[in-house]
Image (cartoon, rainbow, N blue to C red):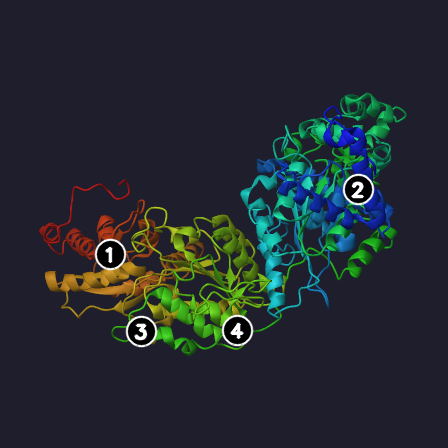
């Protein structure tokens, strides 16, 4: 389409030679018409490069005009029956609205509304319809199925469709957001709560886009390694334009372009509203996002205007209408959709006489029918078709809609749309009339669900479209079909046996040895997915570079600097390691993709993501919670753990609370092992649970960078290690009534307890038993389970916690010491045998840099403080004089007047 020069630059006032400008434009138009767009694009790039070399300062713009990317003549026509699709869409709109309204009308005695959202699905209904009817494949023979990241607030619309399909019952719809009795359906997409329905949790906004990018990359990874054929699968991601302000939403789009993820399609629902008001009232969010994505290297398709605008744009020879479209702010667009056709005529077209002239013969009703592109099924289909056929880049569709479309005065285009949970009878009547729902007036107050008879054309069409696409969606696989076998524990003897003298190792090295042994297993080895965030050498894993390679879809196009080294940096198209760079959120999203592969790809994978423990659960806690919702299976490994282990790094690196955070996630099983054999037993048990039993749990282990002698596995203690507590070094037998204490520890500080055992014996003549407690979290959960049973079964024999079983036959006060906050070990206090003194030492407060010995003195957890705690507890029990504790303070030079580490 030819446009006058003044409309390209806003005005002809600064054009010194309009005729010359016209000739350049006509020449370009002639090339495009005769030789095609690619040739025109090539010539422009050459001209721009020449201009730069000639020193012309060219301002960069990654945006295009505020019009549709696809010209009407280039639109792929929808092969479906758009009339039937419109009817089905109307029924879904009605049922979605009814579900929310009913939930907030029928239970006033419960003292509060259940909530729910009407306006979000109202804006995306057409986009969902096009996908479900024509593009989104279910898993079937020859197709692994598409992955759908559904905009969380639009869940009622997905339920409404599933109801028409017969996948959900009316009783379930009536129990929307009422799940406790097992009859309801969840508020948002939650795989944990609906394990055979929702694929991905998305309502913690920003996480869906981030996880989806790494999911798309993981599908490519599976294909490159020959584990699964994923070449025809797509990842579809629905986001709100307001959601794109979440840093996670845009944080990985560069990676998606760099790795050419053409199996990824983002659909940004640009209804111009966030939860409380306009997204960019003073700007244009579509233009902003276009610049972000195009600048990152994405294929950008804008769908702004519906088909009724096409004749007006075709008559816009001088670009007046385009200029108004560009100049009008999003806040003004929102106001127009909250009003009527007369308001639009005056405030939009009224900006220029020529624009008013364009619509002079149109009624206000005609003007009001000038829809946004996201509500035009033909244009949505054309945009989707263009996206799925694009190669070499990820695609983003920026689709303009109206929030609350069809809600009338109660919500359409209004700031309050998101919070609207109820509609008046008049609103419901208007909704019915607008979408022609066959519900009589006398039933309107009941807001009944509507479902056509099975033999009707609409229902037959609904099922036929899904049959053509392999079945119904969303649908989740709860367990993989394949059955893999974990090698026996003996296969990992490298970490189970005592270390030779002078061959001390760390638990991090033990993990690497375990992983190396696993990689040798022909069946399970290829399914291991080591994930790193640029710290391989920190964790001693650089040897894996050459052994299994780092995945890169382009291979290694350069010669690595360290090519002459044994462990050189080797990238490979079929590499097994996922190296995410300095990117914990990306590493976690990558881990989630691998940890849920059993569900999304019917392939059991075992991801091992190792990172600085302080940069784990604290930094990506929301993703860890989402992993729990998604029923992830795999290993998270927090290296250089504990508040006193990473001695030189200081406050932001030293972890004293990740186990507290891990304990908040119900299906995260966490351990703080001290010895190599504990690492081996725990990880082997985790493999048995997650691979063979397909239990929906994941494991968090904290690892250390301290080298010391490993005592080896005591046969028969395996089950106790898993439960969280075993006696690792008993004290010498003592006479009846002689003072005795029990010392508990985990991680690096268990070694301080072992040292304290010697001091107590040699300096004070007191025997102590030392217990390794790899998991205070697991001990707590087991104890609470016993408490609950006893609470609910008062007449039955009470259960005894594992902690009590272990300690009740071993006399004396109990002292627990860890490299974590006191709250970590304090959790088991309720399960300590009655009448026994329990003292906890921990690392409350900020970390700091110094030598480990100084840090452990500062936090009051070293061997001297453990001895003091033991003596003070014995004194409190009346077993020894209090003066003994005072004597220990003097003997070990313990400072009694220093500031509490919590406040230091």
Viewer-nearest of discs 3 and 1:
3
- Name the side, left or right, on which 74 lies relative to 205: right
Viewer-nearest of discs 4 and 3:
4
Q: Give the labeled residue for mark 3.
A: 712
- Name the side, left or right, on which 348 lies relative to 605: right
Contact check, label 3 and label 1, Cβ < 8 Å: no
Q: Is mark 3 on a helix, strand or loop?
A: loop
Task: Give the Cα separation between the discs numbered 4 and 2.
Answer: 59 Å
Viewer-nearest of discs 4 and 1:
4
Q: Earlier in the sequence, mark 4 or mark 3?
A: 4
Contact check, label 4 and label 2, Cβ < 8 Å: no
Q: Which of marks 4 and 2 is nearer the N terminus?
A: 2
Q: Give the labeled residue for mark 2.
A: 28
Contact check, label 2 and label 3, Cβ < 8 Å: no
Q: Which of marks 2 and 3 is nearer the N terminus?
A: 2
Contact check, label 2 and label 1, Cβ < 8 Å: no
Mark 1: few, some, or many residues within 10 Å (few <14, many ≥20)?
many
* Quadrant placement of the N terminus: top right
Q: Position of residue 902 (x, y in %)?
A: 28, 43
Viewer-nearest of discs 2 and 1:
2
- Name the side, left or right, on which 812 lies relative to 239: left
């Amino acid at each position: 389409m030819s446009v006058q020069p003044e409309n390209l630059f806003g005005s002809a006032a600064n054009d010194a030679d309009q005729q010359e400008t016209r000739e350049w434009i006509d020449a370009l138009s002639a090339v495009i018409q005769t030789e095609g767009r690619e040739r025109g694009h090539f010539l422009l790039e050459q001209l721009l490069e020449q201009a730069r070399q000639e020193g012309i300062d060219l301002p960069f713009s990654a945006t295009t005009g505020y019009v549709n990317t696809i010209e009407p003549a280039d639109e792929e026509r929808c092969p479906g029956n758009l009339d039937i699709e419109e009817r089905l869409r109307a029924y879904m709109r009605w049922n979605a609205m009814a579900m929310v309204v009913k939930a907030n009308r029928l239970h006033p005695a419960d003292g509060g509304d259940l909530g729910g959202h009407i306006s979000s699905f109202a804006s995306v209904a057409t986009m969902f319809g096009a996908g479900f009817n024509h593009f989104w494949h279910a898993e079937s023979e020859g197709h692994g199925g598409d992955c759908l990241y559904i905009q969380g607030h639009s869940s009622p619309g997905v339920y409404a469709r599933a109801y028409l399909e017969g996948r959900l019952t009316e009783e379930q719809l009536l129990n929307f957001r009422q799940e406790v009795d097992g009859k309801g359906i969840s508020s948002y997409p939650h795989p944990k709560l609906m394990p055979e329905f929702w694929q991905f949790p998305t309502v913690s906004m920003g996480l869906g886009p981030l996880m989806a990018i790494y999911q798309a990359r993981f599908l490519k990874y599976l294909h490159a390694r020959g584990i699964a054929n994923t070449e025809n699968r797509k990842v579809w991601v629905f986001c709100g334009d307001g959601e794109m302000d979440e840093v996670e939403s845009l944080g990985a789009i560069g990676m998606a372009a760099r790795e050419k993820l053409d199996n990824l399609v983002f659909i940004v629902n640009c209804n111009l509203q966030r939860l409380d008001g306009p997204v960019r009232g003073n700007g244009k969010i579509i233009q902003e996002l276009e610049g972000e994505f195009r600048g990152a290297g994405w294929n950008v398709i804008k769908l702004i205007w519906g088909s009724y605008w096409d004749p007006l744009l075709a008559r816009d020879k001088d670009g007046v209408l385009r200029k108004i479209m560009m100049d009008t702010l999003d806040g003004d667009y929102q106001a127009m959709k909250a009003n009527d056709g007369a308001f639009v005529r005056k405030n939009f077209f009224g900006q220029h006489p020529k624009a008013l002239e364009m619509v002079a013969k149109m009624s206000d009703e005609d003007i009001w029918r000038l829809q946004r592109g996201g509500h035009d099924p033909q244009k949505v289909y054309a945009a989707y078709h263009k996206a799925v056929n694009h190669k070499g880049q990820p695609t983003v569709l920026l689709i303009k809609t109206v929030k609350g479309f069809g809600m009338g005065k109660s919500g359409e285009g209004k700031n309050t749309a998101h919070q609207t949970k109820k509609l008046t009878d008049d609103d419901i009547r208007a909704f019915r009339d607008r979408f022609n729902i066959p519900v009589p007036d006398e039933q309107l107050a009941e807001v009944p669900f509507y479902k056509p008879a099975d033999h009707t054309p609409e229902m037959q069409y609904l099922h036929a479209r899904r049959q053509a696409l392999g079945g119904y969606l969303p649908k989740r696989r709860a367990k993989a079909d394949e059955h893999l076998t974990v090698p026996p524990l003996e296969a990992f003897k490298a970490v189970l046996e005592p270390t030779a003298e002078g061959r001390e190792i760390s638990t991090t090295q033990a993990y690497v040895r375990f992983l190396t042994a696993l990689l040798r297993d022909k069946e399970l080895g290829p399914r291991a997915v080591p994930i790193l965030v640029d710290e391989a050498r920190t964790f001693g894993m650089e040897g894996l570079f050459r052994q299994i390679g780092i995945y890169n879809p382009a291979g290694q196009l350069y010669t690595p600097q360290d090519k002459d080294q044994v462990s050189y940096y080797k990238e490979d198209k079929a590499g097994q390691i996922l190296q995410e760079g300095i990117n914990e959120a990306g590493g976690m999203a990558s881990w989630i993709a691998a940890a849920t592969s059993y569900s999304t790809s019917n392939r059991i994978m075992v991801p091992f993501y190792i990172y600085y423990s302080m940069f784990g659960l604290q930094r990506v806690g929301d993703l860890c919670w989402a992993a729990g919702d998604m029923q992830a299976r795999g290993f998270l490994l927090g290296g250089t753990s504990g508040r006193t282990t990473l001695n030189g790094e200081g406050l932001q690196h030293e972890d004293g609370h990740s186990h507290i955070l891990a304990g908040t996630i119900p299906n995260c099983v966490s351990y703080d092992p001290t010895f190599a054999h504990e690492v081996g037993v725990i990880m082997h048990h985790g493999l048995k649970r997650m691979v063979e039993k397909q239990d929906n749990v994941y494991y968090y282990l904290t690892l250390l960078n301290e080298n010391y002698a490993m005592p080896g596995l005591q046969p028969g203690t395996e089950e106790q290690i898993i439960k969280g507590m075993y006696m690792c070094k008993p004290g010498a037998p003592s006479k009846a009534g002689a003072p005795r204490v029990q010392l508990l520890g985990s991680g690096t500080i268990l070694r301080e307890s072992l040292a304290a055992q010697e001091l107590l014996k040699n300096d004070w003549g007191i025997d102590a038993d030392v217990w390794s407690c790899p998991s205070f979290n697991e001990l707590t959960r087991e104890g609470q389970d016993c408490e609950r049973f006893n609470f609910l079964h008062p007449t039955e024999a009470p259960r005894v916690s594992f902690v009590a079983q272990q300690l009740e036959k071993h006399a004396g006060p109990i002292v627990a010491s860890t490299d974590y906050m006191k709250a970590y070990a304090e959790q088991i206090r309720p399960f300590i045998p009655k009448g026994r003194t329990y003292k906890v030492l921990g690392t409350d407060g900020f970390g700091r840099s110094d030598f480990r010995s100084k840090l452990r003195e500062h936090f009051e957890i070293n061997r001297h403080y453990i001895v003091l705690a033991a003596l003070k507890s014995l004194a409190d029990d009346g077993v020894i004089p209090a003066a003994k504790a005072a004597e220990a303070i003097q003997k070990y030079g313990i400072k009694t007047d220093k500031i509490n580490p919590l406040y230091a």
